[in-house]
Amino acid sequence: MNHYKLAMLGFGNVGQAFVRLIQRKEVQLREEYGITLSITAIATGSHGRAINPEGIDSEKALTLMETGLPLDSLSILPAPTDNLAFIQASGADILLENTPVSYADGQPALDHIRTAIQSGMHAVTANKGPVVHGYHTLTALAAEHNVLFLFESTVMDGAPVFGVYREALPTAVVDRISGVLNSTTNLILTRMEDGESFDQAVAYAQSIGIAETDPSGDVDGWDSAVKISALITVLMDTPFTPDRVDRTGIRGITPTEIAQAASQGKRWKLLCEAWRENGQIQARVAPGMIATDNPAYTINGTTSIVTLESDVLGALSLLEADPGPHTTAYGLLADLLNAVK
């Protein structure tokens, strides 16, 4: 039986869903995979932090978060307020890095992951920034230290986009990537098809926790741009950052245009596309009207889809219905298992 200690940087909805998932899977992890897990360190942005080499009581940690109380009472060692020092003091085997994304430069998550790798930890993240701004260097650094840098949850939550490419498509050359990668805008456009205005649809998405108070990252296409950049960087093996994506959001789509599309048997979607052209990679995020022959036509609400076109299989689509923190948490667990196996 192998035991692994986990450090969690970020303990919001995804981090808490991950803890509930490993609680639910505890027997299966022990009996089928021969592993046990304990959380030795948790750091949050505004609810304190704790380190306990013997294992933090995860149920108490969840209760404290639910009641809005800090985690500090769970710490038996001083917990550094500096995140890099915190990682080094955690005594963990694996870092779960779930801090907010920076589209511009991937920081501070890049430094978090670099520090974990250099400390001999596997690094698992749901943060897209380190992938688009550091995938190749972090992967090489991880190989030097005999650990892994994994990031399945960064695009389409728990759907195994990167895993399918890595494990199931040997020698494949991906020539084109397309799809709908932002669940918030897909929900907004779906509700506009049902008669709501743009503002009403955004307000609904905010009311159920899908959209942020400031929804610009979604509706202006930044989230889609960073996701297609991550896919290009990994699946097309070409470093690519969001600023290079030709980006247009959905603010300009009107109810009249929604109705006109429906009258033609078409639908508006915020489409992500990347393709090879004259030896270069081109990428675009923009609203587009699609017909029934497009795989993305059928998706509603928060469902997302990606289609990979390669030199060996033609078009292969992966669809994820109704994602949430629980599906992102599963992507983290899948990466953890791939790291330790």
Image: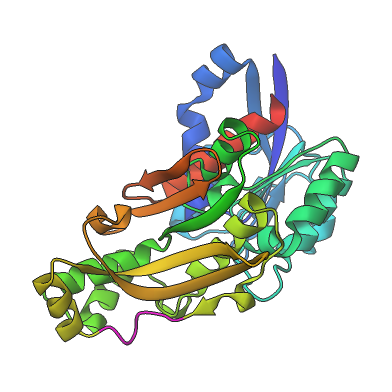
Position of the N terminus, as image quadrant, is: top right
Q: Which residues are magenta?
A: 248-253
Q: How is the image coloured?
A: rainbow
Q: Position of residue 323 (x, y in %)?
A: 37, 50
Name the residue at the front extreme. Answer: 278
Of residues 41 and 122, the one nearer the viewer is: 122
Side of 135 relative to 220 (left or right)? right
Query: Which one is nearer the viewer's eye here, 180 or 279?
Result: 279
Q: Quadrant of the C terminus?
A: top right
Residue at x-position 11% and y-position 75%: 195
Q: Is residue 241 visible?
A: yes
Residues 323 and 180: in front is: 180
Q: Is residue 32 left or right of residue 150?
A: left
The residue shown at (79%, 45%) is 90
Indicate whether residue 249 is drawn in magenta.
yes
Q: Camera-side residue: 25 or 320?
A: 320
In percent of width and height, residue 166 lies at 63, 37
Image quadrant in which you'd find residue 338: top right
Q: Is 266 situated above or below 3?
A: below
Above/below status of 164 relative to 231: above
The quarter of the displayed image where residue 219 is located: bottom left
Residue 320 appears at what percent x and percent y?
A: 37, 46
Q: Write down the quadrant of residue 119 in the picture.
A: top right
Residue at left 51%, top 74%? 222
